[in-house]
Each structure stands twice: as C-alpha cells, then as structure tokens.
Amino acid sequence: MTKASTLKTIKAPIEKELKEFNPYFRNAMRTKVRLLDVINQYIIKRKGKEIRPILVFLTAKLCGEVNASTYTAATLTQLLHTATLVHDDVVDEAYERRGFFSINALWKSKVAVLVGDFLLSKGLLIALDNDEFKQLKVVSESVKEMSEGELLQIEKSKKLDITEEVYFDIIYKKTASLIAACTQLGALSVNADAETQEKMKQFGAYLGIAFQIKDDLFDYDKQAAIGKPTGNDIKEKKLTLPLISVLRNCTPKEKRWAIRSLRKHNKNKDKVQELIAFVKEKGGIDYTREKMLEYKAKAEAILMTFPDSEIKNAMLALVHYTIDREK
C-alpha cells in the first residue's frame, strides 16, 4: 500500500468531518487586517496533512460521537500547531517548509512572529468563546511543555551533555505533548470518562514520541534527492538518540573525537558525513529504530483495548504511517 493510499484509508471514516472542518478552520483565521489576511490565505493553501485534526476526530469517534466541541478542539489544535511552525521557522532561520517559502522568508521575521502570536491567540479565544475551559487547560499545558522542550534542547546543545533520559524528556515536551493533547481533547470533546481521557492522552504521547524518533532518524538516513544523509541536526549541534546511544557505549577516545566533531566541525560536510558513518557503524541507527518500534507497540497496545471497528483500524494505520513515512 502506498503512503497516499494509507493516508486515504486513515481519513476515510472521518471524511465528512474533515470536509466540514475546512471552512470552520478558514473562518477562524479571518481578520480585517489585509496583510494578515493575505498571509493567512497563504498558510491555508500550503497546509500539511492535518494529522492533528485527524487525531482529534478519530479519537472522538473511537470514544463517542463527534459534536461541536470536537470541531472546536480540532480548530484549536491546528491553530496552535500552525503558530508553533511559524515561530519555529523564525527561531531556526528556516526559509522553506514542505517545499514552500516560510512566512519569515516572504514577510521577514518581525511579521512572522506577530502572525504566530495571532494564530495562538485565535486558538485560545475560540476555546473561551465556546466555554471550553477544560480544552483551554489541556492546550495551555501543551504550550508550556513545548516552550520548555525547545529551551531545554537549546541549553543542552550548548553543553552537549544530553542523556537518553533527557532526550526523551525533550521530545515528549517538544512534539509528543501536542499530539497527546489532540487525542486527549478528542476524548474530552465527547465527554469520555477520566480514565479513557488519560488512556488516549497516553496513546498520543507514545505516538508522538515514535513520530519524533522517526524525524531524528531522517537526519541519518539516505536522502533520495542528494544520495546522502542531510546531517541537519549535527550542523545545529543537536544531540539526538542515534548519537546519544553511541556516545554511551563507545571508547573515551571515540567519544572525544565525536564530541569534537560535533562542537568544532559541525559545518564541515565531510566531517558531518564521517560522524554519520560512525553512528551507523556503532549501531546507533539500529538501536534508535528499536526504540521507535517499542513506542509504536505501546501505542498499538492501547488501541487494542478498544472493540474492533473501522475507526480503530484507521488509528492503527495511522500508527504504522507515523513510522513508515518518508518525510
């Protein structure tokens, strides 16, 4: 099955809800400020796979019946996710995302920061306008976690002393916390009991961790377009699991060489490729894939506690898609 057909299978049980969600989301981004409206239209046209709204709707259907509260949750999480992407591009000085120019590339960083702030505030206001105070609490916690995760990674990137425990703390905060919020909100929106809400939050956390580990593996995997790994994390002095696991088990001499390469030669393409080859040779990629599969299995185990259904099958397909995707 191709990736496109897999995504189609995942969306099939919520096709109606996703179709109704699009105008709902566009309406949420409307503004009377012309510049902001132009930028928002650009964002809407280049939207991604909408995994977060998909998670909200699938979880809601798994636990109950989709309602107005579910649409609010889906809109809230998509606005928040979009805001973080806009801000991330500014922080990373990235000028492209998904093959399109970033907001900061087209309208400069000052405008991009303000657009991100607008999207975040719109999300919070949608929750308040619909008296969804519990949803607001869930999302506010996620925003806090994401900010902490990014800052923790920046702090540790300077010292280059990230342990595996700290790594998992960072990726939970940075990525998994919002995915966990999506699945928790899906259950919350249909008034699922507290135990079910917590179960779905945990499912989202496991899925989000597997998702981020997959992202970190991309840095060490061969890219079809250029025939070699990108090494972007290494260039930014980011310690991720493939390298962390190797540094824990290699000799002191090898560790000194690897850290020196990361600290002083991270912009040298040849040195970056040498470090990638070293990580592969020492089993860093295999170890990281094993960890990703562990979290995939944990996410699947939670889904298996629910009765068989089209929704459950779609969510299992989404778990597989998370680790099988090519970008």
Image (tube, rainbow, N blue to C red):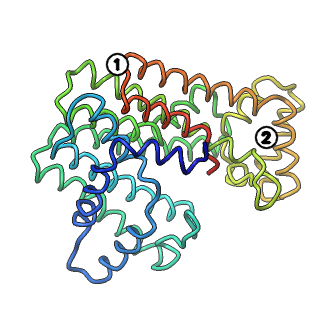
Question: Mark 2: few, some, or many residues within 10 Å (few <14, many ≥20)?
Answer: some
Q: In the displayed structure, would residue 101 be above or below residue 238?
A: below
Residue 56 percent coordinates (x, y): 32, 41
Residue 274: give its label. none
Residue indicated by mark 1: 307
Q: Amino acid at mark 1?
A: Pro
* Left or right: residue 244 compared with residue 147: right
* Left or right: residue 109 compared with residue 258: left
In terms of sequence position, does the residue under pointer 2 or pointer 1 come before the other?
Answer: 2
Residue for point 22% across, 49% down: 71
Residue indicated by mark 2: 259
Question: Mark 1: few, some, or many residues within 10 Å (few <14, many ≥20)?
Answer: few
Residue for point 33% across, 44% down: 14
Could you say which is closer to the camera, residue 103 or residue 16?
Answer: 16
* Left or right: residue 147 compared with residue 134: right
SS at mark 2 in the image: helix
Point out the image quarter for the N terminus: top right
Could you say which is closer to the camera, residue 278 or residue 186?
Answer: 186
SS at mark 1 in the image: loop
Residue 211 percent coordinates (x, y): 54, 39
